Amino acid sequence: MQLGMIGLGRMGSNMVRRLLRNGHRCTVFDHSTQAVGALVEEGATGASSPAELAAKLERPRAIWLMVPAAVVDQAIAELLPHLADGDTLIDGGNSYYVDDLRRAKELAAKNIGYVDVGTSGGIWGLERGYCMMIGGPLEAVQRLDPIFRTLAPGAGSIERTPGREAGRGTAEDGYLRCGENGAGHFVKMVHNGIEYGMMAAYAEGMGILKAANIGKARHDIDAETTPLRDPGHYQYDFDLPDIAEVWRRGSVIASWLLDLTATALVEDPALSGFSGRVSDSGEGRWTLKAAIDEAVPAPVLTAALFERFSSRGEADFQNKLLSAMRFQFGGHVEKSGGH
Amino acid sequence: MQLGMIGLGRMGSNMVRRLLRNGHRCTVFDHSTQAVGALVEEGATGASSPAELAAKLERPRAIWLMVPAAVVDQAIAELLPHLADGDTLIDGGNSYYVDDLRRAKELAAKNIGYVDVGTSGGIWGLERGYCMMIGGPLEAVQRLDPIFRTLAPGAGSIERTPGREAGRGTAEDGYLRCGENGAGHFVKMVHNGIEYGMMAAYAEGMGILKAANIGKARHDIDAETTPLRDPGHYQYDFDLPDIAEVWRRGSVIASWLLDLTATALVEDPALSGFSGRVSDSGEGRWTLKAAIDEAVPAPVLTAALFERFSSRGEADFQNKLLSAMRFQFGGHVEKSGGH
Amino acid sequence: MQLGMIGLGRMGSNMVRRLLRNGHRCTVFDHSTQAVGALVEEGATGASSPAELAAKLERPRAIWLMVPAAVVDQAIAELLPHLADGDTLIDGGNSYYVDDLRRAKELAAKNIGYVDVGTSGGIWGLERGYCMMIGGPLEAVQRLDPIFRTLAPGAGSIERTPGREAGRGTAEDGYLRCGENGAGHFVKMVHNGIEYGMMAAYAEGMGILKAANIGKARHDIDAETTPLRDPGHYQYDFDLPDIAEVWRRGSVIASWLLDLTATALVEDPALSGFSGRVSDSGEGRWTLKAAIDEAVPAPVLTAALFERFSSRGEADFQNKLLSAMRFQFGGHVEKSGGH
Amino acid sequence: MQLGMIGLGRMGSNMVRRLLRNGHRCTVFDHSTQAVGALVEEGATGASSPAELAAKLERPRAIWLMVPAAVVDQAIAELLPHLADGDTLIDGGNSYYVDDLRRAKELAAKNIGYVDVGTSGGIWGLERGYCMMIGGPLEAVQRLDPIFRTLAPGAGSIERTPGREAGRGTAEDGYLRCGENGAGHFVKMVHNGIEYGMMAAYAEGMGILKAANIGKARHDIDAETTPLRDPGHYQYDFDLPDIAEVWRRGSVIASWLLDLTATALVEDPALSGFSGRVSDSGEGRWTLKAAIDEAVPAPVLTAALFERFSSRGEADFQNKLLSAMRFQFGGHVEKSGGH
């Protein structure tokens, strides 16, 4: 079917490619004319403005927004004057589901449908397909089924879950209407919260393995330093790429994130190209706000988020205060390094 | 080759089966004659005591122990009088690597080799193969290579890690000598620590999804209860089996643990067969002790362990103290339920 | 001066008493006529409705609301028709500062002043005075100074902070205008977040002391139970009331909360009157939402909040899922008790 | 009475001073002759070696060691040849209680008594007295009572805990025999664990207050940055010294650590003299190991310890791995700064 796509970054461009390769027609717009041009060469129809994009689409239009969460409202505002009764907007980015609730209501008042889609798969989605978590009115979602079916990975070679009856909905194909509006981004939000937790679990474990040779180092002997009681217990120089690799093979912790970890460690076991300032893009924060509102304890997901904050120096002031207190009660002077 | 196996629980029995099916000869012992008998029917040689097991094996013997961590020392003590120069013991259970260091030293003094093997794969290993993390002298490990190769999953259909050169050791086949003695159980220990973290990440996320309909519930209005500001934000009745399923398909958090989660939720979405008292078998604790000794922050792995402790009521006294303090300063009386 | 008080619970009633005893005139209202009557006997003027309360106060009125956060808006709505230009409302409860921002704006449009006051001191405030954190327009706050000065503890016998210049504002007297509207409740919110963290620190520590005799208990030997390696290290039967007491005397962790802990433990060392379901009244949650928005890591404050959630059974589903996963991969069956 | 003191750092020297001022006789040794000389001027007897110190003391000797945990064994070994039947050693430093168990046993075999004392009070102890948690044989502890009584703060002006009967032991005077050997350092260990938690609670809270003006800053708009939804909620420039001050006056979180926090903030509200590398000296780590062995959840105390590790850069590798994973799945490139 025909789809308009606004926002041709890493994700948007590849989704268009996957659609084009499977016979759909796409009209595309981005502020980068280069991004538009690249897709035109691959068969898309280009547009130089939201207005032009709308004009080039048959009604009822289906327009997918793939832009940063912070500019979705602006993108909708630019597009709205050019839309008509019965058109549908799809927000496939990483929006906060609370915004979906508001937008769906505002657009419904103008007879414009709204579907929120949480999209996972990253830069690999072009090849593997995108896992999609969808929220919105049943009818609107069903009308878009050909798009979702193409973007999704399909059942592929992944085995059926034991006990699951065949043909029970679309989840096995990698896309799912999770509920009314907001449900798609809610589920995607929690998905990312889990992702943070899993990533941190691997990272902490690898950190423990890497430091397992600490018994070979010299330690200061003073009142500011905890002595290492048993240096003989920490004499291991582990080969992290090999360990990540062996875990991929039959272990309980095998996963796609572990596959990626193995790749990263093969490329550079010291990860020297990274400084360790870890960004977060919102979903982890929103997941915690939901956990707090629901009174559901989520210590693992929270710890993972706070590690990211700390990695960016956000704990500096409180750390200074800890040192200041130690100085006040014990005359402790900060040490410049070491364990 | 020929192997003795002591300990025929879930893990030990299936490892023997996998070895027998692939042409190895196994002599087996367990305090349960039933467990021995079952394997004799499948081609193993039975033994009614450690002594008999030792007597039935050609020298140099290779004997694999697959018993709870708490009884490994006892099992070795029973076996030791019947061993001879050049024999090798393999501890394939979930021992603490610090015990490996001691045992290896004690056994080396008697010219008996010791190899520690962390084994992952659970009840699925018979079919999928076991991921093995191995520690011990190079020569002893190499002599056992036919056993490891058979127990391991092999490269199978899992793709090679991009950038990894072909034929670089055995990690791709699902077993790896990680270093000298203790290294196998150290890596397995951290593996399980990561496992706890991942499991908790999924569990917390699912918990947040399950409670996403909390806006439909009534809330008390009093000074002891936090009002839910926006009940409209929590009106979702999510289908957890479907969500676990869709995440298996192309999402960033796809993993074998997620596959199992999907299976469990298909069997019973309410998980009513479980009370929620979650055991821990040591590795999570030891992982944290290592993190502490190494001064490596591991908040996610720790949170996961403490959640298990709490699930078993281990926080009851401290919770009572919190209520007691609240009563002291604010006259707050405990409520009997609700959010 | 003259003050109206609406809400005569534990806090409101005692604040009125403290004001009456120091020469202020109070007109009071509560839905409980008993609460009103009790204060009338002590010299207050009673009112049977918000309207009557307003009618009995001279203009410009100052009316203090001391009601649960969930009903502040309703209380204001009932009062509003009876207020006039130049009156001032004070919200002294545990409101969310975000509501202050909205209310202040709405009331300012009607020429009614709004002051938000976070009040700490609990049931002890009548005797010790209340620590007050205040937000609002400078002029309105200054007009209320006689009230604040009376409610506050005053400098008393607490020593001046070394280096602090004498007469630098009112903080030394136990009340402080922290900034514009919302600032009072913001600071009180963080105060309570810290309180949760401190309480949890004591509670966890006491929990560790209480379990220090665990080496005397028998432990199961099976694959579901971590063996206690050194029972000899855990043979202590500590006297918790004595330990809390000694810490009050010259230790680094002496505090008012510790004083209360000592009292609670003297009353009943086993705390058998409490079930351990710990409430939270909102500020801890809001503190974390602020931390998340600000990207400030707050793992301690968060852990303290989540412990409270867990104490109320809010982790049950996720714990069941952990047990379900363990059953899936390892055939582990839940144990019914023990460590 | 007469006491030998070995180790004249911040703590040891001031303890000698407090003893001398109250009529006790002290013989002192330290590797720093300057430290010895200073105390000789104040009335102590100096010694130039452990041997000389032992020779100058009447039998049965009582010798207090106040040295870093890492050198206690060495100090005992140097002293041992010069001791005799019936002498008593006191370890007043921050030793691991597990070492006390071993030392007590070894020394008992030589008829030398051993008493472990956890000492709190820091550089303020000279003036305020030291809170002491004591482990060891009842008789040995009782013989040392005059020393403990002098070093301790005494009941002073701190009110009796309501409900506590008068004259119930020494806890009210600030010292307590907590149990057999190891009990003193066990209780001190947990005391410091609690201290870490309390310090972190204040530090995190202050961090949240400090960042409460984040709404005034500009934020990037891109897929790597979480938008701040409500900048209007974060417009507060709080005066941290004033807030710490007001909390000292009648609030629930008043404490001695808060007094010190107020002092530190008065000296420099920006804490610019500190880099934020926070040391830990062992007790926090040991507290967690005890919690783990006991299966007592201690998430707050753990979070506090891990924050210190992170403040020293110990999470760098794991943070790099997180960035590497994000790059692998999403092509995310690290940002150089910002929130």
Image: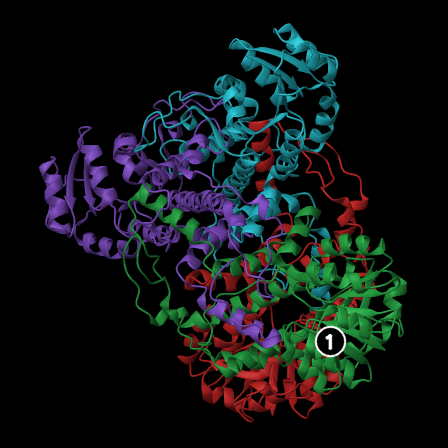
Chain colours: A red, B green, C purple, D cyan
Whether residue C30 can be seen here: yes
Residue in front for this viewpoint, A88 or A323: A323
Q: At which x and y percent is residue D8? A: 66, 19
In the image, residue B287 sits, relative to residue A127, either above or below, namely above
- Amino acid at dot 1: Ala
- Residue C111 on image: x %, y %: 27, 47
* Residue closer to the observer: A32 or A253: A253
C50 relative position to A147: left or right: left
Say whether residue B254 is visible.
Answer: no
Q: Is residue A325 left or right of residue B106?
A: left
Residue at the image point whose x is 61% and y is 20% from the top: D86
Name the image quarter holding the N terminus of chain C: top left
Label 1's element? loop
Q: Is residue D1 above or below residue B293?
A: above
Residue B338: horizontal and vertical position, in percent?
33, 63
Mark 1 sits on what residue? Answer: B47
Within 10 angstroms of label 1, few (less than 14), some, or many (20 or more) residues?
Answer: many
Compared with residue D193, is residue A90 higher up or lower down, i.e. above or below?
below
Q: Chain of mark 1?
A: B
On screen, residue B288 versus residue B209, left or right, reads: right
Position of A151 relative to C183 (above/below): below
Question: What residue appears at the point 65 percent right and 77 percent down from the top-left corner?
Answer: B33
Q: Residue at x 59, y 17 (%)?
A: D14
Residue B286 horizontal/vertical position (percent): 65, 55
